Image (cartoon, rainbow, N blue to C red):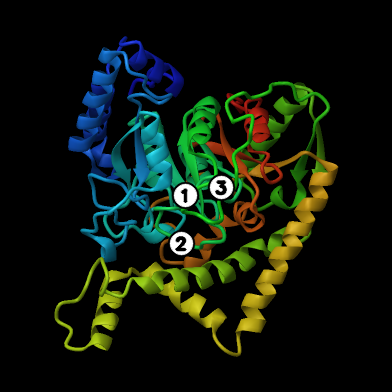
């Protein structure tokens, strides 16, 4: 499909009446229908989107001010609460649930004139790295329909790659924005923990959940982040936005030191992936940066750490889905205990049940010290190692994933193989730092290069990333 103009240009065209918000929304809705075979979208918010577009066009006609994203359509991952559609988080247990309020991130985008036109498919409750764990459909990779788009924000990455909307929203708990962005060939940003409010987003693991944008360019990504970022009274973990904002991206990187992570460049990485990372490093070097090898000794243990802490938080967060308050409830149950049992047995998929059992086990008496406590100690060790490395270099880089997109069904029968897909992304979530996936142009399947920065260096990270944008192998 024809590429969209930049988000800034689209909003300017609407503000100047060069085009209308209604035209943009109708074009997006048409594209969504045309690309139905990819199963990237769970639901369409057609009626509300058209109403909002007409209202924005009326404001333009009357000379009233419109926002920085006026009329720009976007798609939200279906774990964001939105008006005009169900919010299922990709799980049958929430089928039919209509949110009583919207996520703060969606509200802030709409306050600037953006229009949510649909909800994107995802692994149920964001548990997965392939979007095969959705209870409703399996999203196909836009570049090869026999392959996965990644996960859990696979639908969000796919809709941007398919040009259905200029940008989409995703969540990243252990790599769920960056890995699908890598597989689909788009830009995906995991901001600093707390920079974007989590209010109104279905929780997975609360200490690592992060909201971020997926777009086709660094500039679009920066503008969307600029609108969403900042403190929110509805999220006590939220932090202030950068006073300078996120759209004025400095271009001079002369003298910067960037670390190529030794542990990420092992023999397990596909040769073409390693080549893409080295091409990106060469481009940064040519722009004036110094590339050095750095080591984070505890990094190989990060995945094990994550898959103790994450299921522990999942088991706690999913306890609220009991069949009594909202979502699916088994109507055949004769007692309260039977209702709990049947509602959760039928409503949750295999992966949700697996993570609940792992999480309950590591938190149980007799195993808490052996697993959960030790994982938290390792998390602290990782934070210390990253802090030490960031005193030597300003940024670190490596692959997003060890391979390109794998075949649908290739890892679905082996949970451990699927968990290994997160091996290069979980560390950024455990230590709370910003990280980005930048697409590298290849002759084959898309590959993403990952750059990470210290906490709250999101603006600087976006600026450095612009030097990698457009690199090819």
| x and y percentages locating residue 336 in the rendered image | 24, 86
Name the one closer to the observer, 251 or 351: 251
Residue 403 is labelled as 3
Above or below 451: residue 402 = below
Q: Are marks 3 and 1 in contact (CB under 8 Å)?
A: no
Let me know if residue 20 appears in the view.
yes
Above or below 425: residue 109 = above
Name the one closer to the observer, 405 or 364: 364
Answer with the quarter of the image where residue 334 lies: bottom left
Distance of mark 2 from mark 3, alpha carbons?
25 Å
N-term mark: 2 or 3: 2
Let me know if residue 186 appears in the view.
no
Q: Residue at x 44, y 51 (%)?
A: 151
Distance of mark 1 from mark 2, alpha carbons?
10 Å
Q: Are marks 1 and 2 in contact (CB under 8 Å)?
A: yes
Number of numbered discs on residues? 3
User: In this figure, which residue is indicated by the disc labeled 1?
Assistant: 171
N-term mark: 1 or 2: 1
Q: Give the mark toward the camera: 2 or 3.
A: 2
Q: Classify the position of the N terminus by image quarter.
A: top left
Q: Residue at x 63, y 67 (%)?
A: 305
Answer with the quarter of the image where residue 37 lies: top left
Q: Secondary structure at mark 3?
A: loop
User: In this figure, which residue is indicated by the disc labeled 2?
Assistant: 204
Q: Secondary structure at mark 1?
A: strand
Answer with the quarter of the image where residue 34 lies: top left
Q: Residues within 10 Å of mark 3 (few under 14, many from 20)?
A: many
Name the one closer to the observer, 157 or 23: 23
């Amino acid at each position: 499909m024809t590429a969209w103009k930049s988000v800034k240009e689209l909003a300017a065209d609407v503000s100047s009446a060069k085009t209308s918000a209604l035209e943009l929304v109708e074009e997006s809705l048409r594209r969504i229908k045309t690309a139905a075979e990819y199963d990237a979208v769970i639901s369409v918010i057609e009626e509300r989107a058209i109403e909002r577009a007409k209202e924005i066009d009326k404001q333009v006609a009357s000379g009233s001010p419109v926002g920085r994203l006026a009329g720009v359509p976007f798609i939200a991952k279906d774990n964001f609460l939105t008006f005009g559609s169900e919010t299922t988080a990709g799980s049958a247990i929430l089928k039919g649930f209509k949110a009583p309020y919207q996520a703060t991130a969606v509200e802030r985008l709409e306050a600037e004139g953006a229009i949510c036109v649909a909800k994107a498919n995802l692994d149920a409750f964001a548990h997965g790295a392939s979007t095969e764990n959705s209870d409703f459909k399996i999203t196909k990779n836009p570049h090869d329909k026999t392959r996965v788009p990644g996960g859990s924000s696979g639908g969000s990455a796919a809709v941007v790659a398919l040009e259905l909307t200029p940008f989409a929203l995703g969540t990243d708990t252990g790599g769920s924005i960056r890995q699908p962005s890598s597989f689909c060939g788009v830009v995906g940003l995991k901001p600093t923990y707390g920079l974007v409010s989590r209010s109104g987003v279905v929780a997975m693991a609360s200490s690592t959940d992060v909201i971020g944008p997926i777009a086709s360019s660094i500039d679009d990504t920066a503008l969307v982040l600029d609108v969403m970022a900042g403190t929110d009274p509805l999220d006590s973990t939220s932090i202030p936005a950068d006073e300078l904002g996120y759209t004025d991206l400095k271009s001079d990187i002369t003298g910067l030191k960037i670390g190529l992570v030794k542990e990420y460049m092992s023999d397990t990485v596909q040769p073409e992936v390693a080549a893409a990372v080295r091409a990106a490093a060469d481009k940064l070097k040519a722009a004036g940066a110094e590339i050095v090898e750095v080591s984070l000794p505890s990094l190989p243990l990060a995945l094990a750490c994550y898959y103790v802490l994450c299921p522990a938080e999942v088991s706690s967060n999913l306890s609220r889905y009991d069949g009594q308050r909202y979502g699916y409830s088994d109507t055949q149950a004769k007692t309260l205990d039977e209702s709990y049992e049947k509602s959760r047995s039928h409503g949750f998929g295999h992966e949700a049940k697996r993570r609940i059992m792992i999480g309950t086990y590591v938190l149980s008496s007799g195993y808490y010290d052996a697993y959960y406590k030790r994982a938290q100690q390792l998390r602290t060790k990782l934070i210390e190692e990253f802090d030490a490395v960031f005193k030597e270099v300003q940024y670190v880089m490596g692959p997003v994933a060890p391979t390109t997109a794998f075949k649908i069904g290739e890892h679905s029968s082996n949970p451990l193989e699927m968990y290994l897909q997160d091996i290069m992304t979980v560390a950024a979530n455990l230590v709370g730092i910003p990280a980005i996936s930048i697409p590298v142009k290849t002759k084959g399947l898309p590959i993403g290069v990952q750059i990470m920065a210290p906490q709250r260096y999101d603006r600087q990270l976006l600026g450095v990333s612009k030097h990698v944008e457009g690199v090819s192998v």
